[in-house]
Image (cartoon, helix red, strand yellow):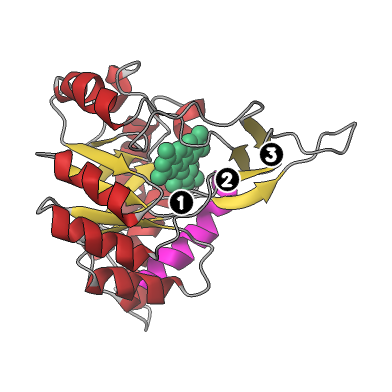
Amino acid sequence: MQLLNASGCLDALAAPEVARQLDAFVTKTVTPLPRAGNAPTRIVETGNGMLNSIGLANPGRERFLAESLPRLRELGLPLWVSVGGFSAREYAETCEWLEDVTIELNLSCPNVDEAPESAAEIVAACRAATALPLYAKLSPASWDIGEVARAVEAAGADGLSLVNTMRGLALDERTLEPVLGTSTGGYSGPGLKPIALAAVFTCRRATALPIVGMGGATTGRDALELVAAGASAVALGTILFADPDAPGRIRAELYAELERLGLPSLDAVRGVAHAGGGVLAAR
Ligand SMILES: Cc1cc2nc3c(=O)[nH]c(=O)nc-3n(C[C@H](O)[C@H](O)[C@H](O)COP(=O)(O)O)c2cc1C
């Protein structure tokens, strides 16, 4: 199974041994200009997951291309670059600069003001700027994620990354005031799993695009369920903060789960949630 990290959840230069357990490494979102990110507190543990309000802290496009990218190439892994911006033009300009990577367009960060253009407009601008594979990373909070998926497919996306975090709030135990410096932040971790599954399931029905499924995966069973809902690859996010060995463990658990279910290979599971009629039960 193709296993990736979720953007912003692994520093491959600080932990190359974790990155090497993956099939590809996804960078933290890169924006045209450097960003210091939001004021602290930027991370808090909460029920069934965590909230973050990092605010896309990153060195900016120029330093990323000159310093980080060459060092990341030395890992010898396929690279995905997560691209962010505040207008379709900003996204497209970064795409123009990239070579020999897959691009993941972060269309959905809850911690910065949304780009004024729609997801489809941003994808169309990037499609015109590059022939590289383009994945559109969507928010699970849109009113009709299937509709957004169809729109980005029509605009030229090659795949979908599902899902980004959901907006959440944690209050201090004593003061009852928001813990995060930005008050609200992005909720990730196990509580996101049913939401991620629903997004993958819905978008599998809505489009023919390959899907990287993510959101609350902490076990091989979680990864298997994302594949059953329609994902062709799985990305790990919050779990990597607690368990750097998660990629190897989750891969092993996934194959153990296949064996437990008496299934010959992962292919038997792909999209099976859509089959209906108890396909697996009938064996
Ligand atoms: C600390 C932190 C930083 C993140 N930074 C980014 C980011 O820069 N770009 C992005 O597209 N998603 C970012 N995400 C969202 C993750 O990539 C992922 O979509 C989300 O956390 C759901 O997966 P999970 O429940 O396995 O963590 C971040 C998540 C966390 C927890």
Q: Is residue 14 shown above or below 43?
A: above
Q: Amino acid at mark 1?
A: Asn
Residue bearing the label numbered 3: 46
Q: Which mark is residue 186?
A: 2
Q: Upstream in the sequence, badge 1 or badge 2?
A: 1
Residue bearing the label numbered 1: 164
C-alpha span from label 3 to label 2: 11 Å
Q: Upstream in the sequence, badge 3 or badge 2?
A: 3
Q: Amino acid at mark 3?
A: Thr
**Quadrant of the snapshot with the C terminus:** bottom left
First to last magenta residue range: 188-204
Q: Is residue 280 visible?
A: no
Q: Element type at marker 1?
A: loop
- The residue under the point 69% across, 33% down is 181
Q: Is mark 2 within 8 Å of ligand 1?
A: yes
Q: Is mark 1 within 8 Å of ligand 1?
A: yes
